[in-house]
């Protein structure tokens, strides 16, 4: 099939490359000329394991093309995926849909034969209705249909999630489009993916409801971890005991820092705004947002306690600063609030992340990036394992840290408390 992906961000690029790898002809479109030039050279704008190899393979085989010409790309394609960003508005917590609607207007000028127009971006309920209105001002409804097909890709696991999805959700009541899209996804359905055809509005809400529920699980286990710390119980026993219940499941029951990234913070706020618009109080999700906002403050308080409130001139090392492992995404990472707060207290911050130096810390005084783990931890008073990269799971702290009185604060519970005790390392985890 001939596909056009509008937007070469996380969703558009990963989905486009994977569709091409399934044998489709795909054009990835972006208005950023520099990004398109780099993609044609095999330079990938995001860190995602396995993505570079797939881009090079499918670009070489000419199944994958890159362009800045939206009109031409749309006219050459049968199925159009809108994959542009929907960030939080600056003046409220609703989703900013300007990019979505601008693309819809541009698409409307390029339709001469029947097109299936799909919102792959995460959008609030009724966005598909608005896209349909915009395009129908210029084109007959016989020439197009608007479908919701939300993505469920985890950063760091995106290619696997595309190839082996739990479900494919198609929001349309148009039988022709449903038949075509079921055929498009048939290679994934044959591998076990559940195919769900719903109304367009239902598909839009499934994405927000799913992310809000996962954010709730993370926040719930973090709060239980707070209780565990007070009554000397290991949170991992609780997580395992709960997760063995098939009604609950073990995923997203790992205590740690606040949730971050491109989805959970944005989507929980956006669904609240949508609910408020319809005068519905989503009190549970509101509580989740509030608890998560307080999470970094609680971890900071713990850090101050570990240092006996003597933070000034302390050498503090962050191992990992992204919101989770296997991604370079810094969006809403708790390190963005924790590091500046520690700097204000007079700490000297050193950090190492496998994805390299972060521009977010460039303007901060007393923040240094190290090129390797051993350099980062060498003279530390306090080492904070912030992100659960595999690189951090077998560090010889006793050998490589020169300060023998250093403290290790493992906010991901990577290490065994008993093992650290044997090594006589001052070790503290979460919910232990």
Image (cartoon, rainbow, N blue to C red):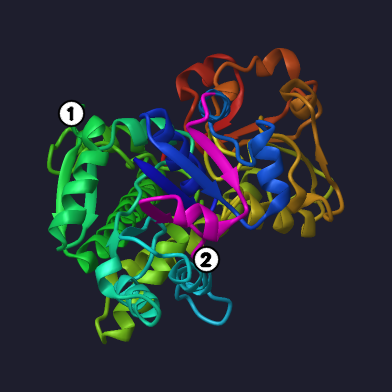
| Nearer to me, 93 or 177 | 177
Disc number for residue 14:
none
From the top left corner, tell me how far across and down residue 392 is, in percent.
59, 24
Residue ID at (56%, 56%): 332
Is residue 262 among the parts visible in the rendering?
no
**Residue 254 at x, y percent in the picture:** 37, 39
Residue 355: within the magenta?
Answer: no
Left of 224 or right of it: where is 76?
Answer: right
- 161 displayed left or right of 361: left
Q: Is 86 covered by the magenta stretch?
A: yes
Residue 285 in view: yes
Q: Quadrant of the C terminus?
A: top left
Residue at screen point 58% across, 51% down? 333
Measured in 3D between alpha carbons, the distance from the residue under mark 1 to the one under mark 2, in whole angstroms, is 34 Å
The spot of residue 5 in percent (x, y) is 46, 50
Does 172 appear above or below 41?
Answer: below
Query: Is 272 located above or below residue 220 in the figure?
Result: below
Q: Which residues are magenta?
A: 61-87
Callout 2: SS: loop
Q: How many marks?
A: 2
Which is more toward the observer, 190 or 369?
A: 190
Q: Residue at x 36, y 75 (%)?
A: 139
340, 63: nearer the viewer: 63
Counting from the top left corner in percent of width and height, residue 89 is at 53, 75
The mark that comes first in sequence, 1 or 2, is 2
The label shown at residue 190 is 1
Which of the 4 image quadrants contains residue 404? top right
Which quadrant of the rendered structure holds the N terminus? top left
- Residue linked to disc 2: 87
């Amino acid at each position: 099939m001939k596909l056009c992906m509008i937007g070469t961000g996380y969703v558009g690029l990963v989905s486009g490359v994977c569709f091409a790898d399934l044998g489709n002809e795909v054009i990835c479109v972006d208005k950023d000329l520099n990004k398109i030039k780099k993609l044609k050279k095999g330079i990938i704008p995001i860190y995602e394991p396995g993505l570079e190899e797939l881009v090079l393979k499918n670009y070489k085989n000419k199944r994958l093309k890159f362009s800045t010409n939206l009109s031409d790309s749309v006219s050459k394609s049968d199925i159009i995926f809108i994959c542009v960003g929907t960030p939080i508005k600056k003046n409220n917590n609703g989703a900013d849909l300007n990019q979505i609607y601008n693309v819809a207007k541009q698409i409307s000028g390029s339709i001469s034969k029947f097109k299936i127009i799909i919102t792959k971006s995460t959008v609030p309920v009724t966005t598909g209705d608005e896209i349909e209105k915009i395009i129908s001002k210029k084109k007959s409804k016989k020439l197009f249909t608007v479908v919701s097909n939300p993505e469920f890709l985890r950063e760091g696991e995106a290619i696997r999630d595309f190839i082996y999805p739990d479900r494919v959700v198609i929001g349309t009541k148009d039988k022709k489009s449903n038949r075509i899209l079921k055929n498009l996804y048939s290679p994934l359905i044959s591998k076990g993916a559940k195919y769900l055809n719903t109304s367009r509005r239902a598909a839009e809400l499934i994405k927000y409801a799913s992310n809000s529920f996962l954010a709730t699980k993370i926040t719930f286990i973090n709060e239980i971890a707070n209780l565990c710390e007070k009554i000397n119980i290991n949170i991992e026993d609780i997580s395992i005991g709960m997760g063995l219940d098939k009604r609950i499941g073990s995923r997203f029951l790992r205590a740690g820092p606040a949730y971050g990234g491109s989805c959970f913070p944005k989507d929980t706020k956006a669904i609240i705004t949508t609910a408020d618009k319809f005068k519905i109080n989503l009190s549970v999700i509101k509580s989740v947002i509030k608890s998560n906002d307080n999470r970094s403050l609680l971890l900071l308080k713990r850090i101050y306690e570990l240092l006996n409130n003597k933070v000034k001139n302390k050498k503090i090392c962050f191992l990992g600063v992204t919101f989770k492992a296997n991604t370079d995404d810094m969006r809403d990472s708790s390190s963005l609030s924790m590091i500046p707060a520690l700097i204000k207290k007079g700490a000297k911050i050193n950090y190492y992340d496998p994805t390299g130096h972060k521009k977010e810390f460039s303007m901060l005084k007393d923040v240094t990036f190290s090129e390797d783990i051993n350099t980062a931890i060498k003279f530390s008073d306090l080492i904070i394992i912030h992100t659960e990269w595999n690189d951090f799971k077998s560090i010889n702290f006793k050998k490589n840290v020169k300060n023998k009185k250093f403290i290790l604060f493992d906010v991901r519970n990577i290490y065994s408390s008993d093992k650290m005790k044997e090594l006589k390392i001052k070790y503290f985890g979460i919910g232990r």
